[in-house]
Amino acid sequence: MADLLWDDVRCFFDPDSMGSLPDVRVPGASVEDWQAVLDLVAEKGWKCRYSEGEAVLPVPRAEPVLARPADAECPNLRVWPTADVVAIFRFHADDEIDFDVDLRELQGQERLDVFCGFLREIGRRLGKPVLMDPEGAHGHPVLGYDTEADRVVLLAEPLVSDRGGSGLRS
């Protein structure tokens, strides 16, 4: 059974009203959690590409990446859980794992299921919630992996309008 149904959450995946690049994050993370995510990517065989600026490099261990100087360019890791869906991890800080997804790639039940599965894999590995905030609304998650329920759940109520629904209910 699907974690979420597309018809129930489509408003949270509307790039026009939610911004096209929501923030997905694991708060309360550590260097060890970052490494666990890197290990998960390798174990699952997900296609990935690590880069620092324009240089594409082998995926390093988490510790040296997170210990780079503050003025160094922020590296990123692109991960494709499927050929049509990419998550872009940014190594901003060791205490929060954060990545972006493009809502335009997450349209329909099949892609939603891929996304939920990806969040579930990360959440299970870390034993921590994985939260999705609308673009620019850090700290206001609309959905996320719930460790106790062991599934992705809604964390905000959709706003249903005359146009078919978009946004959040206040």
Image: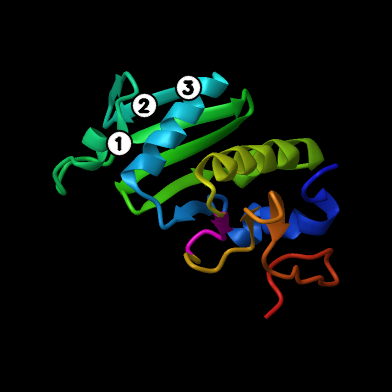
- Residue topped by disc 1: 75
- Whole-angstrom CA distance, mark 3 to mark 2, is 12 Å
Q: Amino acid at mark 2?
A: Tyr
Where disc 3 sits, the SS reads helix
Q: Name the quadrant of the C terminus.
A: bottom right
Taking the spot 44% from the left edge, 28% from the top edge, the residue there is 39
Give the crowd class for mark 3: few <14, some 14-19, many >=20 residues within 10 Å: few
- Callout count: 3
Q: Position of residue 82 (x, y in %)?
A: 63, 26
Which tag, 3 or 1, sits closer to the chain's start? Answer: 3
Q: Position of residue 119 (x, y in %)?
A: 60, 43
Using the rendered view, name the quadrant where residue 121 is placed.
top right
Where disc 1 sits, the SS reads loop
Q: Is residue 133 magenta?
A: yes
- Residue topped by disc 2: 50
Give the crowd class for mark 1: few <14, some 14-19, many >=20 residues within 10 Å: some
Q: Amino acid at mark 3?
A: Ala
Q: Name the quadrant of the N terminus.
A: top right
